[in-house]
Image (cartoon, rainbow, N blue to C red):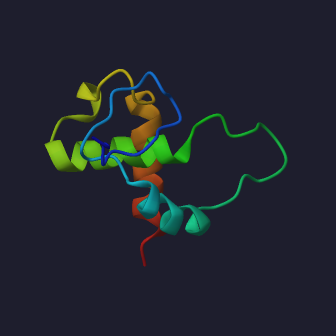
Amino acid sequence: MMSHLPDVANPTRKLYSSDMSDAEWTVIEPKLPAPKGFGHPREVDLREILNAIFYVQRTGCQWEMLPHDFPPHQTVYKYFRLTKMLKP
């Protein structure tokens, strides 16, 4: 039986039903900003950041209660705040 859940960057991470599918990621990824190419390189996986944001939105959990297999809640919340500032 095939799983409907996508592959994730961290293969040891538990998969959640709120995770983006590979098809959804294919649509979203080109719309995300590319790394700057200078300075400190990006260390986070943007797909994992979005999966964590979707997890909070779907479950209603507090940021501090994100499962530990996601990136740190402070990092996820920082990216969430950045997306709110980009809205017109």
Above or below residue 12? Residue 73 is below
Q: Residue at x 53, y 35 (%)?
A: 9
Q: Nearer the viewer, residue 26 or 82?
A: 26
Quarter holding the C terminus? bottom left
Residue 53 located left or right of residue 25 = left
Residue 54 located left or right of residue 12 = left
Where does the image place residue 2, in percent across and percent down from the top left?
A: 32, 43
Residue furthest to the left: 60
Q: Residue at x 68, y 40 (%)?
A: 42
Where does the image place residue 71, in percent across and percent down from the top left?
A: 45, 30
Residue 84 located left or right of residue 57 = right
Q: Residue at x 26, y 47 (%)?
A: 18
Where does the image place residue 20, in percent across and percent down from the top left?
A: 37, 52
Residue furthest to the right: 38
Above or below residue 78? Residue 86 is below
Q: Residue at x 45, y 43 (%)?
A: 49
Residue 47 located left or right of residue 5 = right
* Count of labels in the image: 0
Residue furthest to the bottom: 88
Where does the image place residue 30, in percent across and percent down from the top left?
A: 61, 67
Q: Nearer the viewer, residue 33 or 29?
A: 29
